[in-house]
């Protein structure tokens, strides 16, 4: 029987989550939900020097907003907790000791200065890529070169140390990656990475493997930047005797800059004018705020839909996939190897589609706080029809408000182009006539349209002569949704008062 599906998203709280991180979380979540498995959030905070205040809260909030809700995690708890590595500190040491006892890891006492010195010397000798490895370790200060007593004396004296993994020389490490197929690496290309430090904390590699094992993780789905670490992780599974329990790996393609020139970075957002963060991030050190999709007015489902398509495709032309549909359609087999270019225009397009597909009643509810914040008075009963008209011409809720301010208050400014070109001829006369013609209808969009058309026919006028001037008088704008719909929503009293106002204020 195959193992139950348990996957994890394992961010380090070293700053805000970039959209690449959210995509990793999303793919893990989709995979888990599709397979009836469990999605776990694990906070990897072993490197206290890189810890950034507020980053963990940010990660939790960003996932919540995106709808990527963990089944187990620091907030939710679960049977395999704690889910924060700093809270699991006590559990790592015995595995490190096991590796040392079995000669698969060793103590190294070389100071940071000594290591720098080694690298400098190697550079001078035209060997710029010096590594602590199966060859160089024989001339370094470690438990392989020092006597047992010397090592014990150093440990007793509390000398700082690192535990390094003892990478075998010239062996093959093979593992299967769902996205990339079989990967074979020779251990001679690997260095003796530090797996534990004398502050009692394991490093990322060690903690990550131990936790994946203890949390019974079945699939490791993570960014391509971790691919070079995978052979080391495979060796750790082997050394710890856990090979049979090793998860399947899937390394996701990079998200690239819009021009395809390198990885999309945190800096690209500001430079290119689109957010690279899910929600606003206020840098605790500089106080600067980097913008997020939530605050820019994106629907969470438009955001996850867009993200899912950066690296995955359903194999059909359909592009609109709300979260549940993504779950139903997702498979790792349809994740590509090649980097996916971020496309800012397409991102806006996704939001537009969700805006159009959201029911008017729901949009009206969402619009209320936006209107309140801008201190705009509104009539709740009218909001759904207003939304129905405005959503066809906007990409965001806020844009709907901007475009449709005339639904909430009479215009004070009038579109200059229309005024200069059309109003000056016989507009006042036409507008006055239409006011009278409209007053003889029941003010539904249909009857207003009919009255308008009859008036045009009787006076041998084209639409272009009468439409724009009536629109500018009522809305102040030169374009927008159907004028008759607008008039029907505003009602007779308001339409007439606006026409009177325009007649008074316009030349
Ligand atoms: N803590 C690593 C990160 O920040 C996790 C990598 C992994 O998923 O193994 O991305």
Image: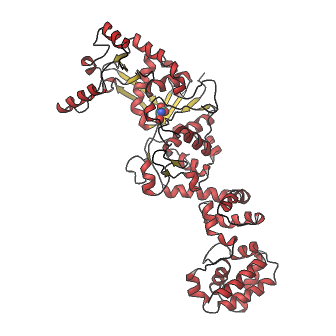
Which image quarter: residue 405?
Answer: bottom right
The answer to whether 171 appears left or right of 210 in the picture is: left
Furthest-left residue in this view: 125
Q: Position of residue 126 (x, y in %)?
A: 18, 33
Residue at 31%, 16% (x, y): give it.
Answer: 142
Residue at 55%, 21% (x, y): give it.
Answer: 214
Q: Where is residue 310 in the image (x, y as percent from the top left)?
A: 50, 47
Residue at 49%, 22% (x, y): give it.
Answer: 210
Q: Position of residue 409 (x, y in %)?
A: 69, 73
Please say if 331 is above or below 392.
above
Q: How many labels does the image show?
A: 0
Please say if 415 is above or below 285.
below
Which image quarter: residue 482?
Answer: bottom right
Can residue 356 be seen by looking at this rendering?
yes
From the viewer's side, name the closer residue of 85 and 192. 85
The answer to whether 17 appears left or right of 159 in the picture is: right
Q: How is the image coloured?
A: secondary structure
Please say if 293 is above or below 99.
below
Q: Quadrant of the N terminus?
A: top right
Q: In which quarter of the image is the C terminus?
A: bottom right
Q: Position of residue 20 (x, y in %)?
A: 49, 43
Can residue 317 be seen by looking at this rendering?
no
From the viewer's side, name the closer residue of 141 and 62. 141
Please say if 377 is above or below 456.
above
Furthest-top residue in this view: 149
Which image quarter: residue 108?
Answer: top left
The answer to whether 363 appears left or right of 296 in the picture is: right
């Amino acid at each position: 029987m195959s193992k139950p599906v348990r996957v994890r998203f394992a961010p380090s709280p070293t700053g805000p989550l970039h959209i690449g991180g959210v995509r990793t979380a999303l793919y893990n979540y989709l995979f888990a939900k599709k397979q009836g498995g469990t999605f776990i959030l694990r906070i990897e905070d072993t490197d206290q020097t890189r810890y950034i205040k507020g980053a963990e809260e940010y990660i939790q909030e960003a996932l919540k907003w995106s709808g990527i809700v963990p089944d187990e995690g620091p907030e939710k708890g679960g049977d395999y907790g704690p889910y924060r590595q700093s809270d699991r500190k006590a559990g790592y040491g015995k595995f490190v000791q096991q590796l040392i006892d079995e000669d698969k890891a060793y103590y190294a006492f070389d100071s940071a200065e000594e290591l720098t010195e080694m690298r400098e010397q190697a550079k001078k000798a035209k060997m710029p890529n010096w590594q602590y490895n199966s060859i160089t370790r024989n001339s370094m200060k470690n438990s392989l070169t020092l006597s047992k007593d010397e090592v014990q004396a150093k440990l007793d004296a509390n000398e700082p140390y690192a535990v390094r993994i003892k990478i075998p020389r010239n062996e093959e490490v093979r593992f299967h990656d769902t996205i990339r197929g079989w990967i074979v690496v020779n251990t001679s290309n690997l260095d003796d990475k530090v797996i534990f430090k004398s502050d009692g904390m394991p490093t990322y590699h060690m903690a990550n493997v131990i936790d994946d094992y203890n949390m019974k993780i079945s699939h490791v789905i993570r960014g391509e930047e971790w691919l070079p670490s995978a052979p080391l992780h495979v060796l750790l599974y082997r050394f710890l005797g856990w090979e049979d329990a090793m998860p399947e790996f899937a390394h996701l393609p990079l998200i690239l800059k819009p021009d395809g020139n390198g990885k999309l970075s945190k800096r690209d957002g500001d430079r290119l004018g689109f957010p690279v963060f899910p929600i606003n991030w206020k840098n605790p050190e500089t106080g600067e705020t980097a913008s997020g999709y939530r605050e820019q007015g994106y629907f969470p489902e438009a955001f996850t839909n867009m993200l899912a398509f950066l690296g995955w495709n359903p194999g059909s032309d359909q592009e609109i996939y709300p979260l549940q549909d993504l779950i139903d359609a997702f498979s790792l087999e349809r994740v590509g190897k090649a980097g996916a270019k971020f496309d800012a225009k397409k991102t806006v397009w996704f939001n537009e589609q969700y805006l159009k597909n959201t029911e008017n009643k729901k949009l009206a509810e969402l619009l209320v706080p936006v209107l309140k914040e801008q201190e705009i008075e509104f009539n709740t009963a009218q909001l759904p029809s207003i939304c129905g008209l405005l959503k066809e011409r906007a990409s965001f809720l806020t844009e709907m408000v901007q475009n449709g301010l005339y639904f909430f208050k009479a215009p004070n400014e009038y579109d200059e182009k229309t005024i200069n070109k059309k109003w000056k001829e016989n507009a006042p006369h036409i507008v006055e006539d239409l006011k009278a013609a409209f007053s003889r209808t029941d003010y539904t969009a249909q009857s207003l349209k009919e009255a308008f058309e009859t008036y045009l026919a009787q006076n041998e006028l084209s639409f272009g002569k009468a439409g724009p001037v009536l629109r500018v008088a009522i809305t102040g704008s030169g374009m927008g949704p159907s004028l008759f719909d607008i008039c029907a929503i505003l009602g007779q009293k308001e339409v007439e008062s606006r026409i009177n106002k325009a007649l008074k204020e316009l030349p």
